[in-house]
Image (cartoon, grey):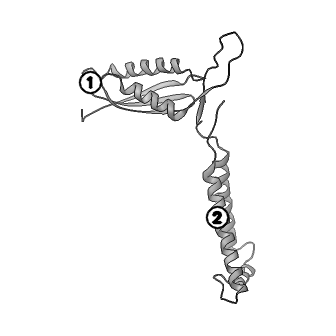
Amino acid sequence: MIRRPRRSIPATIVALLLLAMCVLVVLCCVQALLGQTPLISFTQLLAVGSGQSWDSAVVVTLAVATAVLGLVLLVAAIRPGNPTVMPLVPLSYDGATGSDAGVRRHSLVRDLTTTAEAVPGVTKATVDAGRRRIVATVAVAAADPAAVPDTVRGRLEYRLVEIGPAPRPKVRIRARRDDAG
């Protein structure tokens, strides 16, 4: 059970572009039907379009730009994002297969941040959780700053054993000296 985010940004961009073009065409058609001067004249568009050849620089540039934009949107839509729900180890009490369960990545990050900030000597912690790796950046203001990262790693690994993500991510600690504290 790995839920990934929906790709709403590429879909929104394409939808807004199509909507803008449709609104512009409808507006011009309504203006032409009412006998007003259209915002964009169809005869001017026809003159510009018919004056271009397939090998002109303008047409090639627009075609390449459209292809690049389409490729970028396609890659953004296909590429999987960070999971929003991370699977947990299935628990089984009677030997049968356990049920699927998961933890939201945001909840896991918040829990691990609280765990890291509870370590003596840590003034601030930020945690980034991916499927395979947890990276905790801690600000250390302690008498023995060298021991703090190992303590944070141990606490985070213990907390991950308690939570039980499957597979269990590796923990990496970045420590920096807190000059304010």
Pointer 1 residue: 142
Within 10 Å of disc 2 (Cα), the crowding (few <14, some 14-19, many 20+) is few
Task: Return the residue found at the far front.
Answer: 94
Q: Is residue 147 above or below residue 181?
A: above
Displayed quadrant of residue 89: top right
The amino acid type found where label 1 is placed reads: Ala
Residue at figure coordinates x 64%, y 68% from the top left: 20
Q: Is residue 57 visible?
A: no
The numbered dot on residue 56 is: none
Q: Which x, y percent locates residue 152? A: 39, 22
The amino acid type found where label 2 is placed reads: Leu
Residue placed most toward the observer, 145 or 106 = 106
Residue at figure coordinates x 70%, y 90% from the top left: 35
Residue at figure coordinates x 39%, y 26% from the top left: 116
Q: Tell me the element at label 1.
A: loop
Pointer 2 residue: 17
From the viewer's perspective, is the residue at label 2 or at label 1 nearer?
Answer: 2
Q: Tell me the element at label 2.
A: helix
Task: Return the residue found at the far bottom.
Answer: 35
- Spatial CA distance of label 2 from label 1 is 54 Å
- Quadrant, the C terminus: top left
Q: Which x, y percent locates residue 46? A: 74, 82
Q: How many marks?
A: 2
- Quadrant, the N terminus: top right
Q: Earlier in the sequence, mark 2 or mark 1?
A: 2
Q: Is residue 13 above or below residue 175?
A: below
Task: Return the residue found at the far top.
Answer: 94
Residue at figure coordinates x 66%, y 59% from the top left: 14
Displayed quadrant of residue 91: top right
Q: Which x, y percent locates residue 150? A: 39, 19
Q: Is residue 137 above or below residue 75?
A: above
Q: Which x, y percent locates residue 74? A: 68, 51
